[in-house]
Image: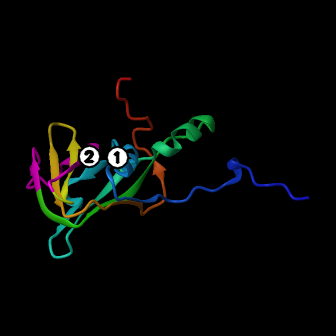
């Protein structure tokens, strides 16, 4: 008789998630909350109808395990891409200052009159990016190995 593997024996794999509706987007938003984004790592590719960001996200999915194993919390670089993008607008962001680091608070979706709508990236400090989309399709994909969070701390929301 063979023994089944336990959860603890499983290995972690990089995230590769997609959202095709507002409920799915809530999961991606929760995992990307508190990500930091250098202003230089945003790309609007009009012809490809894609807006993408390279973000350094806190690994919320690993927080409890790090605590149990008494090891530092981690971040990982991930690509957040919004497909079917028709128009991108921003407020509260000075794109000329190449040293700005943005902090992502939330990702939400506001449906439009037809199938389209807007994806809203809410940033700390009253900044926001709105991406008008023909249809909702958002992807979050880890692209590097996790690394120790420079602060060594879990982001604090005062709760």
Neighbour tally class for label 1: few under 14, some 14-19, many 20 plus, Cα within 10 Å? some
Return the residue found at the far bottom.
47
Residue at point 16%, 50% (across, down): 129
Q: x, y (%) of residue 73?
A: 49, 41
Mark 2: give few (<14), some (14-19) or many (20+) Cα within 10 Å. some
Q: Quadrant of residue 19?
A: bottom left
- Front: mark 2 or 1: 2
Is residue 105 highlighted in magenta? yes
Above or below, comparing residue 98 to residue 67 in the picture: below
Number of marks: 2
Secondary structure beneath label 2:
strand
The label shown at residue 89 is: none
Question: Percent position (x, y) of residue 6?
Answer: 73, 50
Q: Position of residue 74 (x, y in %)?
A: 47, 46
Q: Closer to the camera, 130 or 152? A: 130
Query: Which residue has dot 1 on it?
Result: 29
Q: Are marks 2 and 1 in contact (CB under 8 Å)?
A: yes
State the residue at coordinates (63%, 39%): 69
Q: What is the CA distance from the residue labelled 2 to the residue labelled 1?
A: 7 Å
Per the image, the residue denoted by label 2 is 108
| Residue lying at the far top of the rendered structure | 159
Displayed quadrant of residue 105: top left
Q: Which residues are magenta?
A: 89-113
**Which quadrant: the C terminus?**
top left
Numbered disc 1: secondary structure: helix
Among all residues in the image, which is located at the extreme right?
1
Q: Is residue 67 above or below residue 82?
A: above
Q: From the viewer's perspective, tell me whether residue 34 is left or right of residue 74.
A: left
Q: Residue at x 34, y 59 (%)?
A: 20
* Left or right, 62 with reference to 120: right
The mark nearer the N terminus, 2 or 1, is: 1
Residue 4 on the magenta segment: no
């Amino acid at each position: 008789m063979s023994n089944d593997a336990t959860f603890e024996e499983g290995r972690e794999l990089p995230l590769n998630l997609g959202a095709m509706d507002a409920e799915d987007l809530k999961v991606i938003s929760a995992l990307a909350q508190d990500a930091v984004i250098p202003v230089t790592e945003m790309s609007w590719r009009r012809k490809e109808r894609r807006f993408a960001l390279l973000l350094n996200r806190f690994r919320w999915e690993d927080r409890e395990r790090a605590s149990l194993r008494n090891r530092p919390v981690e971040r990982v670089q991930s690509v957040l891409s919004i497909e079917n993008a028709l128009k991108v607008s921003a407020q509260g962001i000075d794109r000329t200052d190449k040293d700005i680091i943005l902090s992502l608070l939330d990702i939400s979706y506001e449906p439009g009159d037809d199938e389209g709508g807007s994806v809203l990236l809410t940033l700390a400090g009253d900044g926001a990016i709105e991406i008008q989309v023909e249809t909702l399709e958002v992807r979050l994909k880890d692209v590097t190995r996790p690394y120790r969070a420079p602060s060594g701390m879990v982001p604090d929301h005062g709760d």
